[in-house]
Image (cartoon, rainbow, N blue to C red):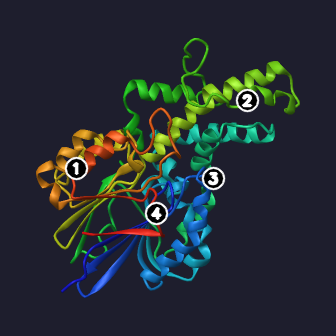
Amino acid sequence: MSAPIRVRAYVVGFGDCILLSLPDGSRTRHILIDFGRAPNDAGSLERFPAIAENIARECNNHLDLVVMTHEHLDHIEGFYRERAVFDRMDVDRVWMSLPSHPEYYTDYPQARLQKRLADAVRGFADLARRRRLVLHPAFSSLLANNLANQDRIDYLRKLGRKPVTYLARTKKTGANPWPQAIKFHVLAPEADTSAYYSNAASRAHGVALAAASGVTPPAATDGEPAWDFRSVPRASDADQTGFSQSDFARLRRSIREDGVAAARFIDRAQNNTSLCLLIEVAGKRLLLPGDAELESWDMIRKHCRAQMKPVDFLKVAHHGSHNGTPMDALDTLLPVRRARKAQVLVSTKRNVYGTKNPVPDAALIKELERRCKRLVTTDGAPGTHVDLTI
């Protein structure tokens, strides 16, 4: 008799770290999907050493597969921070989404908008650092989550015995290493991620942000931009910067109006590069969509109709945010009539992200609860992990 399917979700705070133990005949395959935490959730770092050691112990220092869904720190920082543990482990394969390929923007020039925006926002961050400006903590966290990640990605590229496999919906070579017992379906991302921003309004906004020297401000209401970060930077910091009040005011408007807008855009764009996997094993269906947002779900429903069927396990996208799971998709994935067969995981932590739209979204959680026999959240869970047997 084969071993059961086990999903172990580690309590990393606001972030993802999931160890799948899947039966493959007489053996068990161990797959680690992400290991990170949000930059503004500093206390969670204390958990990382114990989590890394638990991962090593559970897989007997051998991971069959490591999956980096996308490049945000709340999905990758733990690998690099606990590299002393991972360096002594045997890792067979590493998978990344295609947009993480070093030559991606050469191969897909239509997707360069995201890179141009990232470069512009990186310029904002560097300027703020040089000027010693005090940025709103939520804005600083947003910048760090999107920009402070190159060394983490470089480390993961060298972690596996085999070369990295870069995957997208239409680029799936190497996506089924154990076809006899375990089948992987790559539902996202689209190979050319500009497809997510092809509508006129979205692309026009992005192009405007990336234009000229970096950015052009969106329209303001009553003289105030409609972004969340009202103290980016604080006016009282003007005396500390060493330049005139008028120059300071101009820089402050630029950061608030342009920098925040561009940072929001690339944050959403990066989420939509998430590697979304449907795994079929032992007669069960497990769906792990990373941080896919609504644009990615639209493409999944358009191109992957054959795979959009009820699942036995769902890892909720984007930590349970309001823009991470379309409610109508739940009718397909988690129909109420089948609630007693489904289990749901939300890797999240309250009061870390979102004031206008708090994460996790209360309405989404309530809806998920009525569609499954068990909903597990890492929010406030004791110890290093919670387990689900599928």
Residue 191 in view of the camera = no
Secondary structure under tag 3 reads: loop
Q: Amino acid at mark 1?
A: Cys
Disc 2 residue crowd, few under 14, some 14–19, many 20+, Cα 10 Å: few
Tell which circle, 4 or 3, labels the residue nearer the N-terminal end: 4
**Marks 4,2: beta carbons within 8 A:** no
Secondary structure under tag 4 reads: loop
Pointer 3: what residue? 148
Tell which circle, 4 or 1, labels the residue nearer the N-terminal end: 4
Q: Residue furthest top?
A: 222
**Marks 3,2: beta carbons within 8 A:** no
Question: Which image quadrant is residue 197 in?
Answer: top left
Q: Nearer the viewer, mark 4 or mark 1?
A: 4
Q: Is residue 311 above or below residue 54?
A: above
Q: Amino acid at mark 3?
A: Ala
Q: Quadrant of the N terminus?
A: bottom left
Q: Which mark identifies residue 234? A: 2
Q: Nearer the viewer, mark 3 or mark 2?
A: 2
Q: Position of residue 184 (x, y in %)?
A: 27, 65
